[in-house]
Image (tube, grey):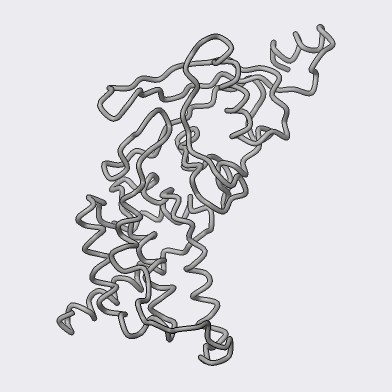
Amino acid sequence: MSQEQNRRRRDGSHSDCLSFTIKVWRQQGPDDKGRMASYPIERVRPEMSFLEMLDVLNGELERKGEDPIAFDSDCREGICGMCSLVINGVAHGPGRGTTTCQLYMRSFPDGSTITIEPWRAAAFPVVRDLAVDRSAFDRIIQAGGYTSVNTGSAPDANALLVSQEVASEAFDAAACIGCGACVAACKNASAMLFVSAKVKHLNILPQGQPERHKRTVAMVEAMQVEGFGNCTNEYECEAVCPKEIAVEHISFLNREYVKAKLLGK
């Protein structure tokens, strides 16, 4: 039992709570050099989510007259992908198939030190502290992640026949929430897993066929313009993806790109 646990037992209060040392990246803005800062935090409930813990820490900092730690969050339900943090060197922290907002403090040993950093990639510049600008992903989607066919009113659900196998593959690819963990984990800061998922979920459906080759080339070229690196098959992207997008999608993208270029698209 740690000294902190013994102290809390002697005090007879908050015996079921945890305490941590939080080492967090602080950066005032894009042009600031940045630094690591350490903060103690106590009385953390095991069932608290990681973001709730940061909320508590920010409350303590504000009471002391210090600037709160800036970080992104929205849904806090593992859907939006905004909770982009590297925790103890792992994008979204320990555990597979989970986002930061779904990570609970019981996952960390009592009294341990937790290191928190932002996504580190040239294409994701730091805005402040742990918040980064991920608009590069938006521009890739704008380049081709859509179908521009004017379909009028909503078609009948059974008007276009899609096999169960194709539908399942499309849904698997469409599960990508665009959080950027794949980029943060890759030593090359590659966005290939993100782009391949966005390309595949449209390219294999009937609605995506008219712009299939144009979409593929446009999105890959947009990715290159944004400054993302190349894939070297390290599989780190798949390991940290909260939706467990498989690297097989990257192979699909490579085949689609070669086919499109051979056709002169």
What x and y, as percent, mark residue 176?
Answer: 48, 60
| Residue 149 falls in image quadrant | bottom left
Q: Residue at left 19%, top 55%? A: 225
| The C terminus lies in quadrant | bottom left
Q: Which residue is at the front of the view, 20 or 141?
A: 141
Residue at 77% x, 12% y is 8
Q: Which residue is drawn at 37% across and 38% down?
A: 132
Instruction: Indicate whether 143 appears above or below 263.
Output: above
Question: For this view, does 153 lie left or right of residue 101?
Answer: left
Of the 4 image quadrants, the one containing the N terminus is top right
The front one of 83 and 91 is: 83
Q: Where is residue 129 in the image (x, y as percent from the top left)?
A: 40, 28
Query: What residue is rendered at 82% in x and 7% in y?
Result: 10
- Furthest-left residue in view? 264
Q: Which residue lies furthest to the front in this view?
A: 152
Note whether 222 is above or below 171 in the view shown: above
97 to the left or right of 189: right
Q: Report which quarter residue 35 is drawn in.
A: top left
Q: Which of 156 and 260 lies nearest the eye of the viewer? A: 156
Q: Residue furthest right?
A: 12
Residue 91 at x, y percent in the picture: 46, 42
Residue 193: name its quadrant: bottom left
Rendering coords of residue 171 (x, y %): 53, 72
49 lies left or right of 194: right
Q: In this view, does 62 lie above or below 91?
A: above
